[in-house]
Image (cartoon, helix red, strand yellow):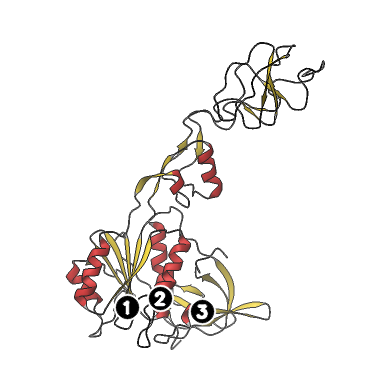
Amino acid sequence: MNGYFVLYPFELGETLTKRINVGVSTDNSFGCELAEDVVCMEDIPPYDVSLRDGWAISTTEGNHTLVGEPVKNGEQPALLQKNGSRWINTGGFLPLAADAVVSDSDPQAPDFAADVYPYENVLPRGTEWTKGSLILKKGTVLGAGAQALLFEAGIENIRVWKRPSAAILATGHEIAEAGALSSAGRHSSNAVYLMNLLSGLGLTDTAIFYAKDEADSIADRLEVLAQSFDFIITVGGTGQGKSDMLRLALKRAGAKQSEDQTKLSSSLPFVCANLKGAVLFGLPGNPLGFVNIVQRVVLPVIWQSFRTDPFFVRRQKVFMGFDYEGKAGDICVQLAPFEGRVIALPVQKGSGRSSAFRDAAAAIPNPQGRRIEAGEAVEAQLFFNGLLS
């Protein structure tokens, strides 16, 4: 067990976020969840519509020799003259008093419309929806199909759960801003990792910021970010060393820190706070700890701030490739195929090793801290990689 990474149980004593119901334009709603039912405001289609090119006629008449002007798509229908016919293209509104479309005949022919029945080649008014009918239920996530229905129904504005904004603040004297890397600095791979995961969740308002390891500089930056973002996730500076400035910066910025409510761990393995209405997570700079806390804590909390369904987790049957006997918690593992099985191997602790982005693939929950022997079948919860695959 020595050297394995385990995220021990913890419990935050207060609700971190609440979902906010907002009105948005339909063309800016893709990926959002409806906060209320959407009903149709009018009959759809609003008039009888031609389903193919042809001649609009009235089947109650036996003479259709008077040929009128062609129907222009998009125009509201005019009255069809008695014994008349008018050319109409697919999608055009039928003239008033017309009730069928003859698709392939000459109106001057003796047998024109002889066998046509009412509403042949016609989509009647209100066939899709009638005024007041339900189009989409509350809780529907607006994917391509659902959003297309809204546009078809002419719904211009809807109410959804607000998609949160998130700022990622990478701290450290050695961290260089994108494009400014020198031989003495390094980029924040943690920040880029998290940014891509947030994008995979559907967040569209995210950004990476930078600050040196100075309490005043970090505090100033946090206060500014709290005015514009719903979530702030900091990277680095969460330890107890002299150069770890996050907690001091939070105090100076006026943040209220959350406390761990469990008896199984003496303190949170990260910093959680509320700053002027923004939820803040202070995460370690160590990639392995960062990856595990992002996957098991940060992503689910952000998800629940704008979605009703639980955070999605892919599960897979695996076989332990090592004996585990330790404290309760989530055991971080890498996965490897072997003889037709998937074997779970421990991810070893290692300060600053970026291989965690490649190796940390899943967590095996073990809330009771029971002994798990090599070869035992267990369920692994796969880490989200920002993609659907």
- Name the residue nearer the viewer: 227 or 72: 72
User: How far separated are the C-alphas under marks 3 and 2?
Assistant: 12 Å
Is 303 located above or below residue 97 in the figure?
A: below
Q: Is residue 193 left or right of residue 45?
A: left
Label 3 neighbour load within 10 Å: few <14, some 14-19, many 20+ = few
Quadrant including the C terminus? bottom right
Q: CA distance from mark 1 to mark 3?
A: 20 Å
Q: On the rendered structure, is 73 left or right of 366? A: right
Residue at 26% over, 78% down: 212
Query: Do the residues under discs 1 and 2 have CB atoms within 8 angstroms?
Result: yes
**Residue pointed to by mark 2:** 190
Label 3 residue SS: helix
Give coordinates of residue 18: x percent, y percent. 33, 54
Q: Is residue 74 above or below residue 234?
A: above
Q: Which residue does the numbered mark 1 point to in the structure image? A: 236
| Residue named by callout 3 | 358
Measuring from the top left, give residue 32's x and y in whole percent. Answer: 45, 51
**First along the sequence among labels 1 and 2:** 2
Q: Secondary structure at mark 1?
A: loop
